[in-house]
Amino acid sequence: MIIIPARLGSTRFPNKVLVDINGYPMVIATANQVRDIDKVVIATDSKEVVDIAKKFGYDAVMTSSSHKSGTDRINEAISKVDVGDDEIVVNVQADEPFIEAKVVQKVYDRVKKAIKDDEEFMMISCYKKIDNFHADDPNLVKVVLDDKNRAIYFSRSKIPYNRGDIKSYFGHIGIYGFSKKSLNEFCTLPPAPLEDIEKLEQLRALYHGKKILMVEVETSSFGIDTTHDLEKALKSC
């Protein structure tokens, strides 16, 4: 199942999930990108978003307006759906209207394999190779991996520190895959100091010794956080 958390109260770009993207509200444009992978459900705190989802043929679940993260929102949504603990749950943010289906499919397939092989994991995410210039951007999160493609650490800083001849880094892409069971477990973990310092919730899992499995992808998509991002994205269409 693909769950898209869609709240209206964005501080930097209010109501951005409803802004027009080539004739569709942003949340619907995002849903259209991934609808062939699995069932799509929109998790929201807005009756307006529920009505729009239904208009375009998507299921929507009303969730609390007090959630601090999209992960908490999708956890509430999946708890209201009659599925088992091994149900695949992929979190695709509503502000990713240009995300390539192949990227989400790769995360989805990795979750499926991890469940089938009974691997230890809390979540699965993805990364792409980025150059030195883009690695300097604190809004583009970097990840360091071990030899089994598991995350060691995520940071807004450029990591690892380059005392050698590093020509590329790994940029994290914010698509997250869980089983229903691992999603619930993540949301019951206490917040972590590292999570608060970096403002990266995935660090909660690493702080508590949980495994984050990573897959490499190729993507040119990026999230729409500001009106400037939107203008840039539409010009590149």
Image (cartoon, rainbow, N blue to C red):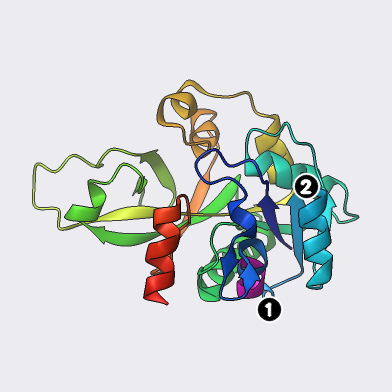
Query: What is the crowding at mark 2: few (fewer than 14 residues within 10 Å), some, or many (at least 20)?
Result: some
Pointer 1 residue: 36
The percent position of residue 232, horizontal first and vertical second, equals 37, 64
Quadrant of image for the N terminus: bottom right
The residue located at (27%, 59%) in the rendering is 130
> Which numbered tag is attached to residue 46?
2
Does 158 lie within the magenta span?
no
Count of numbered labels shown in the rendering: 2
Identity of the residue furthest to the right in this view: 82
**Camera-side residue of 56 and 36:** 56
The percent position of residue 164, horizontal first and vertical second, equals 8, 47
Q: What type is the residue that disc 1 sits on?
A: Asp
The residue located at (61%, 44%) in the rendering is 122
> Which numbered tag is attached to residue 1?
none
Q: What secondary structure is found at the residue carrying circle 1?
A: loop
Q: Indicate the quadrant where residue 53 lies.
A: bottom right
The percent position of residue 6, horizontal first and vertical second, equals 68, 51
**Camera-side residue of 229 and 38:** 229
Identity of the residue furthest to the left in this view: 164
The residue located at (47%, 50%) in the rendering is 225
The residue located at (65%, 43%) in the rendering is 71
**Camera-side residue of 2 and 12:** 12
Answer above or below: position of 158 versus 226: above
**Labels 1 and 2 touching (C-beta < 8 A):** no
Q: What type is the residue that disc 2 sits on?
A: Ser
User: Can residue 2 be spotted in the picture?
Assistant: yes
The CA span between labels 1 and 2 is 25 Å
Span colored in magenta: 30-34
Q: Earlier in the sequence, mark 1 or mark 2?
A: 1
Answer above or below: position of 141 versus 127: above
Q: What secondary structure is found at the residue carrying circle 2?
A: loop
Q: Indicate the quadrant where residue 198 lies.
A: top left
